[in-house]
Image (cartoon, rainbow, N blue to C red):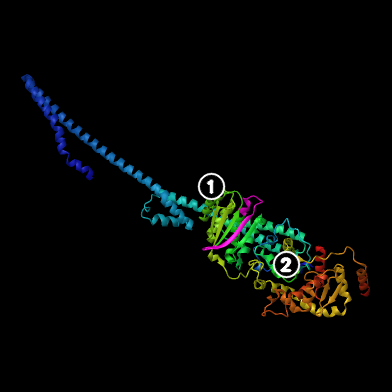
Amino acid sequence: MARVESPQAGREAPVARALLLPVVVMAGATAAAAALVAEPARIPVVWCGAFATVVVAALAVEIARRGRTIRRRTTEYQQRVTALERRIAEHDEETVRIGKELLPSAIHRLRVGNSPDEVLRDVVDSDPVYRHLPDAQRSLVYTVLDIIDNEEATRDSAQRAFVNVARRVQAIVHRQASELREMEEHHGRNPDVFDDLLRIDHGTALIGRLADSIAVLGGARPSRQWPKPVPLFSVLRGAMSRILEYPRVDLHSIAKVAIIGTAVEPLIHACAELLDNATRYSPPQTRVHVTAVEVQTGIAIEIEDGGVSLSEEARARAENMLARAQAGSSMNDLGESPRLGMAVVGRLARMYDLQVSLRQSAYGGVRAVLIVPRAMITTGPAPGIAHGIGATSRPTADIDLADMKHVVPARGRRRKPSPVAARPATGPVTAEQPRPVTPAVAMEDDLPVVTEWTAGGLPQRRSRGRAPLGSHNLPAQAADPTAGRTNGHGHSYGPGQDNSKEPPPGIWLEAFTKAANGVPHEPGPDEDSDDAWDKGDLQ
Amino acid sequence: MSSPRRERRKADPALSDPERLYVITGDPDGSERAALDLVTMIVSKSEPSPTVQPEQAVILRLCQAPLSVAELSAYLSLPFSVVTSLLTELLATGLIESRAPIVRATLPDRSLLEAVMHGLQKL
């Protein structure tokens, strides 16, 4: 209203000014015409003049008014146009802001786990900038969030599905691996079957690694748990045992530390993937060298191959892949790259704080460095030491007795029934000597024909021909059971252990020999024949 | 007959290890095993050098006094075939010596057959 009123206030002066000229000119012309015309015509001329003047005045007023209206409308239009233009610009800006700020933050909140409604409430309604968002845009944002939510749910369930499948495969592989180990123990004395079993075992391990990779790419953690620390050496050999071309890997100077149980499986898997890359992308006749040294931040495991040098772009691509996997890239990025291993390593590195880098190797190939953080390392004794002895190669005797402890009692326990039961059996055996001797001879070849009996009633074989290394040692051990303790390992039977129950090695070697010779002892005729059959298989 | 044995040999899951046996054995194709028997005695000829495989180092340490293959297999808790392939490598490098396995006669000798016959007659 104010806008309309202000021109109205100043309207009088321009109207008078616009009116003045035509009226004065018309009045002048009328006066001039009245003066010029003859007397009788003067009155009508004056009338006409007056009428024309009035008409002109009226027209002038009207023209002036219309002109003013036009001007006012023009300014109004211009104002409206500017206002509309400003609004359009504002809309554009808002759209851009929705695209660049609102949606990303909303999607981020959605990914964290909020529902679309919650996100809309948190992001749009609580923000004064977006509070007055038009309904259309609001529903647009909501629809977008809803679609994304649905997609994420679909992808999550797909991922869960194949992680689930991978878990089942892992379980089967795990069970099969332990059964294979059992079979390997069982057929340990039949080299042909044993080698075939090893081959199957190897194939199973490869399947297991694939299942592990799928699980890791699906966002799950490795399922296998190791209850106790495992020496790094065993960890690296575990990694070797999961790749195809393990004979090409050389382990040099591995730091003598152990890896805590929870970190064992991911480390094995990451190393296996790196080793797999190294062996796969290098010529088959080259070796892959692995070293592990202590560094300030932990242990640096270096894997060097003598393969084709990684070009700068290829290296950048691989590093990029690692980085993307570390940043938590989605499965979608994986499809295009054949190097699945790098993505797995990257994910494991992200989950477990490992650092991975790829460098040019001095051998010309690639040098992958994996840095294991100090938190994963324990320098204390690793009770779960793989083969007891695998971890240390120090040539001191006390090392193996410490390491052996978990091995020897187990064996002793297992062997316990046979020597203990064999002792009562010595009575009848010595009483009727000919009977056991005959099968012994029948089972063995004809060389050890002399069979004697020790003071303890145990059988003793002596070979007729040459008696080289250590065969003379055997009767000495048997005659004096304590002599077995001087064997360097014998003193692993500490004072805390029951010596009477667990005979020193010499004694149960005797029992073993006896069993192998087929001398029957009382409780186990089936075992004897079993052994005899195995022996037959062997030869 | 084999099932009780299987039970006895079941590996303790707590002691299971990440490394599989074929990694310890080495190359699967080149596994030419020396003719070693369970009762073959092994004695080491030198101290383990730092470059040998840990299991071989342990064999060298254990065999400073003569030990049978069966005992080695038990102490290392490794199957016989694994131990023999480890020993084969050591034999090839000359780090250990073994008593040559006993040659089996092609035919049993007469006295043995007679002994069997007498034994059977006494039953």
Q: Which residue carries the number 2 mark? A: B45
* Total labels drawn: 2
Q: Classify A506 as above or below B94.
A: below
Q: Amino acid at mark 2?
A: Lys
Could you tell me which residue is drawn at 91 percent across and 67 percent down? B109
Identify the residue position indicated by label 1 in the image.
A313
Q: Quadrant of the N terminus of chain A?
A: top left
Q: Secondary structure at mark 2?
A: loop
Q: Chain of mark 2?
A: B
Q: Which residues are magenta?
A: A276-298
Q: Where is residue A148 shown, x and y percent of the image?
A: 49, 52
Q: Position of residue A5 (x, y in %)?
A: 20, 43
What number is the disc on residue A254? none
What's the distance in space between the residues labelled 1 and 2, CA to CA? 53 Å
Q: Secondary structure at mark 1?
A: helix
Could you tell me residue A213's position as x and y percent?
60, 56
- Note whether residue A407 is visible: yes
Outermost residue to the left = A39
